[in-house]
Amino acid sequence: MKFFVDTADIDAIRELHALGMLDGVTTNPSLILKSGRNILEVTKEICETVDGPVSAEVIALSAEDMIAEGRKLAEIADNIAVKVPLTWDGLKACKVLSGEGKMVNVTLCFSANQAILAAKAGATFISPFVGRLDDINLDGLQLISDIRQIYDNYGYETQILAASIRSANHMSECAKIGADVCTAPPAVIHAMANHVLTDKGLDAFVADAQKAGIKIV
């Protein structure tokens, strides 16, 4: 499973990239706002840091305007994936932009039916939102499983990009289901390294090393 990080924080991106943990980056207007930077400027810097796809989201609502914004965003770098919402206009924009050879990430997916439409429209990525479904007492992981089954049934090439990831458990469950990509905040990726028994074992090893006076350098 590929790891994308869901942030516009360039320092966090560089840290994870240096560790070989990143296959791409996803951003959205909320993350750009949080960064406090110009969207074109920060997106360009991210694209220069990461070799893989960098999702940059349009803000328009009409297909015509989404296409214009998508073309503008795609000029930033070759690894831009234009992010469009899963609306009828978004699907129209996806069809045009993907037909021009641009990567397209169709976001805000909450049903298998929506995922089928995105694949038919030529989406490179479909972004089902796991956590937001869980928030309203629906099963976000089940949606990932349903889309996986449908795409495998018919050979759709659209990659399942599990989004709205809230926990390390979400990451491992999506991997077991067969999501192609998970995008998560830096804190969630860091949390994957944590385990209470690791901490307990390390404390014991350190205490014993100190008692034995062990020094390596």
Image: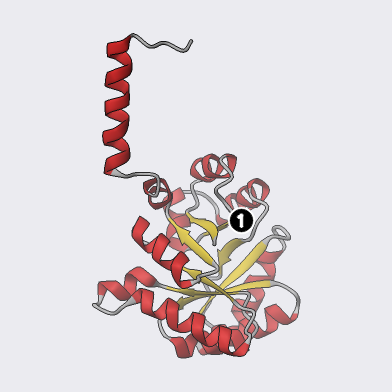
Amino acid carrying mark 1 in the image: Leu
- Looking at the image, residue 181 sits to the left or right of residue 53; the answer is left
Question: Residue 208, percent across and down?
Answer: 29, 19
- Image-quadrant location for residue 176: bottom left
Residue at x 60% of width, y 50% of height = 46
Residue under numbered circle 1:
40
Q: Is residue 125 above or below residue 96?
A: above
Residue 53 visible in the snapshot: yes
Question: Residue 119, percent across and down?
Answer: 59, 85
- Looking at the image, residue 200 sits to the left or right of residue 114; the answer is left
Residue at x 64% of width, y 79% of height = 157
Q: Is residue 1 above or below residue 16?
A: below
Give 194 or 64, whichever is nearer the viewer: 194
> Mark 1 Cα within 10 Å, few/some/many (few <14, many 20+)?
some
Residue at x 48% of width, y 82% of height = 147
- Image-quadrant location for residue 169: bottom left
Q: Is residue 40 above or below residue 66?
A: above
- Looking at the image, residue 68 sits to the left or right of residue 117; the answer is right
- Image-quadrant location for residue 80: bottom right
Give 209 or 171, whichever is nearer the viewer: 209
Q: Secondary structure at mark 1?
A: helix
Question: Residue 151, percent across and down?
Answer: 56, 84
Residue at x 40% of width, y 72% of height = 129
